[in-house]
Image: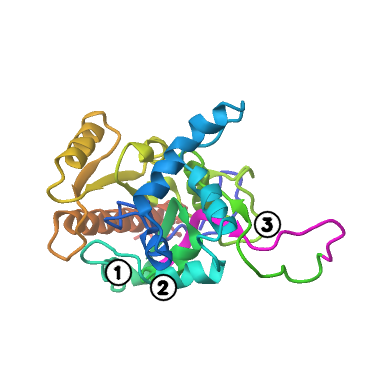
Amino acid sequence: MTGTETGTTSPFSQNVIAIVWDFDFTLTPKNMQVPLFTAYGVNEEKFWKEVNALPAYYKKAGVRVSEETAYLWHIISYIQAGKFPDLTNRKLRELGKKIEFYPGLPEFFPMIQQLLEREPFTEYDLKVEHYIVSSGLTEMIRGSKIAPYISGVWACEFIEVPAGPDEDFSQNPKSGLISQVGYIIDHTTKTRALFEINKGVNKVEGISVNDSIPENARRVPFKNMIYVGDGPSDIPCFSVVQKHGGLTYAVYPKGNEYKYQQVIDLLESKRIDAYGPADYREDSETVLWMRKKVLSIAQRIIDEKKSALYSQIKSGPKHTS
């Protein structure tokens, strides 16, 4: 594929359509952490009430705490208090198997991918990749039943045994109980993940999100991207994807008037292109929209590739009569 006007060649064929998903309440009817509370007999309502009180509590000491990710440190407090007595990353991944999803999952993921497993799409090696960008827990997502269909996860991560002074960094990290927060994603840093997908940071070692890469040399152009979320916390991602030519979609649980009004507000404020029920069965409005848009993007990619090819062809000499 021809690159910029200077004649450089793109490292990517830009043949990927990326569907980027929020997780909680977009793919699941409940918080993903429900299996964690159930496994240890912890009162979920009490836990979240405590988490919601943390910012005001620590403000009394002049300390600012992130409202969206304060729960991570509260999980560690519960570990230290013996309420999650043996919690490791491996345990989180096992608990991920018990996450409840909306109807139609995980079958929806391979079904959408299989749309492009026929001509003319296979001729151009077009494919769909699914990504998760969430303020939830990476290990639980990796253990869930949708994990085999996901090309990358950006979410929060824990460290078990932290490296100490004079650590031998040639060795593997020690395993043990979770004790520190290692990586954080919130509703604003989610946008960084979008640019990492856009530039191919997760696929090619040595590429940084801060590297300057021409649009036609990026792995997944934003116009080949669909972002799916469920509410106001997704507005930063909706805005970035829309601004750069991609599509945005919001879901709501059937019968939930409050959530339904939220997505109506998002549509009326032009934050999203469309909305539908959080139902991923084959005949749902959401699946019909997704199928239509994936096929439309795929056809546009083919048309652009054909146009780029023909623009490089110069007619050879012809016989004159």
Q: Amino acid at mark 1?
A: Pro
| Residue 47 x, y percent position in the rendering | 42, 49
Q: Disc 1 vs disc 3: which is toward the camera?
A: 1
The answer to which of 303 and 152 lies nearer the viewer is: 152
At 56% from the left and 48% from the top, the residue drawn is 73
Q: Which residue is mark 2?
A: 148
- Part of the protein shown in magenta: 150-168
Q: Which residue is mark 3?
A: 206
Q: Is residue 10 magenta?
A: no
Q: Disc 3 vs disc 2: which is toward the camera?
A: 2
Q: Residues within 10 Å of mark 3 (few under 14, many from 20)?
A: few
Mark earlier in primary sequence (3, 2)? 2
Mark 1 and mark 2 in contact (Cβ < 8 Å)? yes
Work out whether 232 lies above or below 112: above
Q: Quadrant of residue 176?
A: bottom right
Q: Amino acid at mark 2?
A: Pro
How far is the residue under mark 1 from the one under mark 3? 32 Å
Q: Amino acid at mark 3?
A: Gly
At 62% from the left and 65% from the top, the residue drawn is 177
Q: Residues within 10 Å of mark 2 (few under 14, many from 20)?
A: few
Q: Secondary structure at mark 1?
A: loop
Work out whether 309 lies above or below 96: above
The answer to which of 288 and 96 lies nearer the viewer is: 96
Q: Secondary structure at mark 2?
A: helix
Q: Is residue 89 left or right of residue 221?
A: right
Q: Is residue 153 magenta?
A: yes
- In the drawing, what numbered circle is on residue 106? 1
The answer to which of 251 and 32 lies nearer the viewer is: 32
Q: Secondary structure at mark 3?
A: loop
| Residue 39 x, y percent position in the rendering | 41, 68
Q: Residue furthest right?
A: 166
Mark earlier in primary sequence (2, 1)? 1
